[in-house]
Image (cartoon, rainbow, N blue to C red):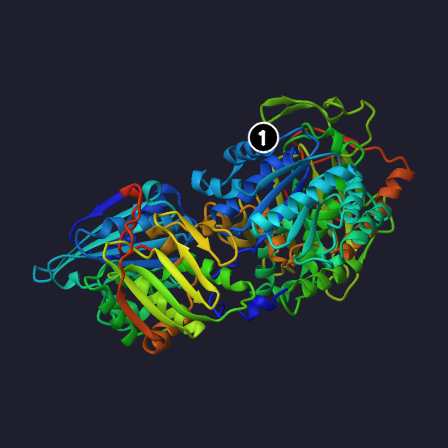
Amino acid sequence: MSAPQDSNPLRDPQDRRLTRVAGPSALVLFGVTGDLARKKLLPAIYDLMNRGLLPPRFALVGFGRRDWSDDDFRAQVREAVENHARTPFREDVWNQLTAGIRFVQGAFDDAEAFGRLKETLEELDKTRGTLGNHAFYLSIPPNAFEAVCTQLAENGLASSEQTEGWRRVVIEKPFGHDLESARELNEIVESVFPADSVFRIDHYLGKETVQNILALRFANEMFEPLWNANYVDHVQITMAEDIGIGSRAGYYEGVGAARDVIQNHLLQLLALTAMEEPIRFDAEYLRDEKAKVLAAVTLPDDLESYSSLGQYAGGFQGGEEVKGFKEEQDIPSDSRTETFAAIKLDINNRRWAGVPFYLRAGKRLGRRVTEIAVVFKRSPNLLFRENSYEEFGQNAIVIRIQPDEGVTIRFASKVPGTQMELRDVSMDFGYGHSFTESSPEAYERLILDVLLGEPPLFPRHEEVELSWKILDPFEKYWGDHGVAPEEYAPGSWGPESAHRLLARDGRAWRRP
Amino acid sequence: MIRTLKDTTSSDVDKELAKMREETGIRTLGRVLTLVIMADMGHSERAIEAAIAASHEHPCRIIVHISHDPKAANRLDAEASMGGDAGASEIVVLRGWGESAHASESLIAALLLPDAPIVAWWPHSLPDCPADHSIGRIAHRRITDSARAEVPWDSLNELRKRYTPGDTDLAWTRLTLWRIQLAAVMDEPQKHRINKVIVEGSEKSPSVLLLGTWIGYRLGATVEIRESPQPRGLYRVTLCRDDGEVTIYRPGRNIATLSIPGSADQQIALPVRSLAECLAEELRRLDPDEVFGEVLNEALSRSEVRFTQGSAPVPAGDPSDYTEVYDA
């Protein structure tokens, strides 16, 4: 895959101004009418084109049930781009994209339609010069994967053995709803596509700040020596949203916060925070280290006390009245789906033994924030024992993923004008300032990486399995014991049980 | 917030800045570098504008030194701004007469951010040797713009003679998008040898020469530079292969056509870059650009370059779509 790059005389590893442009390729999008496609994927494709990172020989093929012509689909794409693209709309760039846009009408199990898709791609290979390089983006519910994959295989679209070019498939979370279903799903996909052609998108990993975790940890000398059980007391990973589920009832009901967020985003963040240093930045090494640390995760014996489930109630949040989860559209009034989940995990390796990792995720919480807080042990405090113990607490390094990306370091300082009063102060590094105002959307980076065939940012199946192995026992316990989510007020930081979870260990959640 | 100080010293300006920060509450110093701009009288505005735009990506302190009459009595005026129009930067404009008409380390030392990299930028004129200049010596990067000099190619030649790692030139930065597209063309396995490269554009544009020598050196091909009789920037690059010509042709300012033998012509986005975009790219890296050094030191002297007078066709279309001579 990298051979032509290496032999390109114009490339030089020292020439870092030369970013790579994707090679000739066609992207086939399943699920073109979905929210994700309209708001993120199609605009990201345009933005990439506008930045000159897509090849001139690029084609975009939509596949869906709607009775659309190519022109109808072009109009849809244009609308999505005009409304949601990050970069300004330019007619000339659009014209470049539009010539390669096609639409194939059909159902996901319609053999004839897939025949037409094949013809369309062959036509594009000829007229547009896409050289048989095809990426299939399955922005569709997992229960449709099987039909689509089977059809792709039967029509000879999935394999590139007989033809030129590469074939790649992109799938979105959720990768199953437990270990078993994840395996089934993976078998379906990997029976058709080779493992290294499967790109699992976790859009969180495309974020600049997530990649910055690695820079912070491994490019600096002052953090890594402290990054272990000798100095760290515990780690809190939070992903909070201030909104409810909106119109996503169909997706959310029966899934819940733990499967929706903890299994993928939070465990990936945990892995990046806790893993050892990979020897190279390549996909293989990075994924090995993540898998190692995920495999070392152990669960608490008492699953009930060390987990918490919540469901937001109705009420007033930040000045407006909001519905409770059970009153949301299409949610049954006796729903037991959790909108908040918190769990405690341990990592049983030399670096982390004895340092609990607390993970929480929820909707309708105090504010929208995702962060990793590494909280250090208390100082022995011999010198300052006159001070009330609460006045200053533990040092912390907080990596803020979104919004307001950056890093905060908390430490104690003397209050000016007093004899020796101490208090905690924060030192802030705001990433948003130090990076371009319009830093690329995660999806731009990820789509480009798919077309370039660069997998470091995509979790492989092993990581998905390991994550389910961590979450499944909790889910099973909650199911078997009929643990009902506890109500919490909108705009709060979750139910009482979440606070008890940390209080039991003599700790408290940070207010993010 | 803008404060003006007449007949002042840089240490007073520094105090004023501290006071302004106190008053506005803009306390966090998330500044990643100090950008020192050495401007000619009457030419500072565009440079400042570009620097402010670039500061959104690289928050910095911008020190602009404008040189007035060096024979007048010594005097330094300053104008400090923060917040609002200053974007993500703090700007200090220094106007110097007499001894203060010369930008030097001792003049600005009090205003440099502690322990942050320094970038020196000469938007118009070229110092005799950027690396020997008092401020050039303490700078991590020295940005010049040979395209704006009176005789651009001579400046490039001067740069070559005195090249020190850390030097960079905006005539090179303007080429990045062209180079990306050319490298992308070459990413595909090449079945045919490239014997000759033709680069077409204004004879006044150092970018044309830099691009030609870079490709020629890399591909081991002879380079022909066709000087267009019309004042237009770089507009066409042709790679001559055994089986035909690979061409990127941009008649206007935005869209280029890529022609490869055996496949249909394709359109690519290849916009002319603004000064702010070029500056922002320069500030992304503060270590020496070794490839640029190689182009100056090796390629420029070794490449086989031939100059011919081209008879470039007048690009049709709206004159507002024409490029300037120095554009690439």
State the residue at coordinates (68%, 27%). Answer: A247
Given residues A46 and B70, the one toward you in this image is: A46
Going by the picture, which residue comes out furthest to the right? A480
Q: Is residue B62 above or below residue A313?
A: below
Quadrant of image for the C terminus of chain A: top right
Residue A8 point in image, percent of width and height: 52, 68
Determine which residue is flagged by label 1. A72
Q: x and y percent of residue A9 in the render?
A: 49, 71
Foreground of the two, B159 or B64: B159
The residue lying toward the viewer, choosing from A21 and B117, is A21
Which kind of residue does numbered mark 1 sit on? Answer: Asp
Q: Is residue A172 left or right of residue B181?
A: right
Q: Is residue A432 above or below residue B130?
A: above
Residue A350 against residue B60 in the figure, above or below: below
Q: Position of residue A331 (x, y in %)?
A: 77, 25
**Residue B316 visible (yes or no):** yes
Q: Can residue B288 be spotted in the picture?
A: no
Q: Residue at x 79, y 47 (%)?
A: A154
Displayed quadrant of residue B235: bottom left
Query: Quick check: A221 left or right of B127?
Result: right
Identify the subunit bearing mark 1: A
